[in-house]
Image (cartoon, helix red, strand yellow):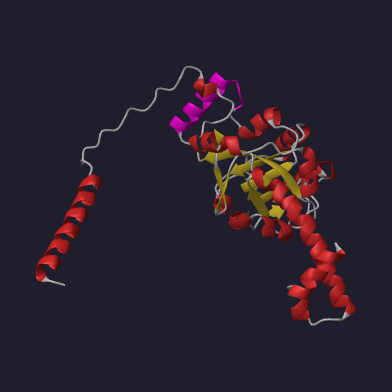
Amino acid sequence: MRLTQIFTLMTLLMCTGLLQTTQAQVSYDQDFGSDVPVPDGFRTNRTSFSAIMDVLAPSRPEVTQAQLDQLREIPLEAIFGAIGEYRTNYVRGFANTRPGERLVGRALTMRFLPPRPDLVRAANTLAEEGNWDRRYYARASEEAQPGDVVVAELGGSDGHNLFGDMGATGIQMRGAAGVVIDGGMRDLVGLQDDRFEGFPVLHRFSDPHTTSWLGVEYNAPVRIGGVTVLPGDIVVGDDGGIFFFPPELVDRVLEYAVESEAREGFQLQQLLDKNYRFRDIYPLSPPLVEEFERTR
């Protein structure tokens, strides 16, 4: 390549880079639009506004009680296999007031913070304007719907208590399926009573102190352990841990569970029959995949 051609090429590259750099540059003193004023009455909405949920709402279908009942029978391992990128939305380290009972439902979320005087004043003002109880467990005792699972962000193992057996009873009487507390509760012995059968409370610890933290967001995104939970997420938990995943995945989970049960039944029979090596059965070799499809 001649020297003049090299010079021309270098000039073009420099000009192109300069043009791109110029287009990307923005003044240090940017001009930002003003925030939109809060409309009258907006603070009395029953749920806390979340721009994130406003974006996601159209893609989140209603999940029926029949679907929730089906999820109750599906192993967590099958759910893991079905939910793809949401597999990491799983938390462990919770005690269960009803050992052996599974918790399934739709997330009704709430977030709490330690109190301070100005926060207390604000919480009281909002409760009065919206005609709700400042104690969010009491709100849920009046507003929860059948199939809801109260999911409370409460500081984890270093946090505070949500309620005792009276608060739990109020939520139970609304038809809620149970509660997840990333924090504590009181009245452990009371919550283990047989009257709470079918209403498990998964919690980090139990403590005799009364509730003092303040609810600051109701039915908005929360953090439980190291995962994000959105209002309306599907909650499936037991003594081992809890999955949270979007409602649009429910059909996929149910279909996968049927397929998984059939495949594992076939594999188990092959193992018991001793006709093939383990490596041919788990996972199925191509010829056995064909045989499995034929037997279905």
Camera-side residue of 139 and 245:
245
Could you say which quadrant of the image residue 32 lies in? Answer: top left
| Image quadrant where one finds the N terminus | bottom left
Q: Is residue 177 left or right of residue 133?
A: right
The number of numbered badges drawn on the structure is 0
Q: Quadrant of residue 160?
A: top right
Horizontally, is 31 left or right of 103 in the view? left
Q: Position of residue 198 (x, y in %)?
A: 81, 44
Q: Quadrant of residue 210?
A: top right
Q: Is residue 118 left or right of residue 219?
A: left
Q: Considering depth in this image, is 82 or 221 the residue closer to the camera?
A: 82
Name the residue furthest right: 273
Q: Is residue 108 above or below residue 91?
A: above
Magenta-span inclusion, residue 126: yes
Q: Residue at x 23, y 45 (%)?
A: 23
Q: Main secondary structure of the magenta part?
A: helix
Q: Is residue 124 above or below residue 196?
A: above
Image quarter in which the C terminus is found: bottom right
Single out the residue that lies furthest toward the top: 40
Q: Position of residue 293 (x, y in %)?
A: 81, 65
Q: Is residue 214 visible?
A: yes
Res. 219 visible in picture = no
Q: Residue drawn 72% across and 61% down?
A: 77
Q: Residue at x 66, y 47 (%)?
A: 249
Q: Is residue 80 magenta?
A: no
Residue 91 x/y as whole percent? 62, 56
Identify the magenta region. 117-133
Q: Where in the figure is residue 265, as x and y percent of width and height?
A: 84, 66
List the single residue furthest toward the left: 4
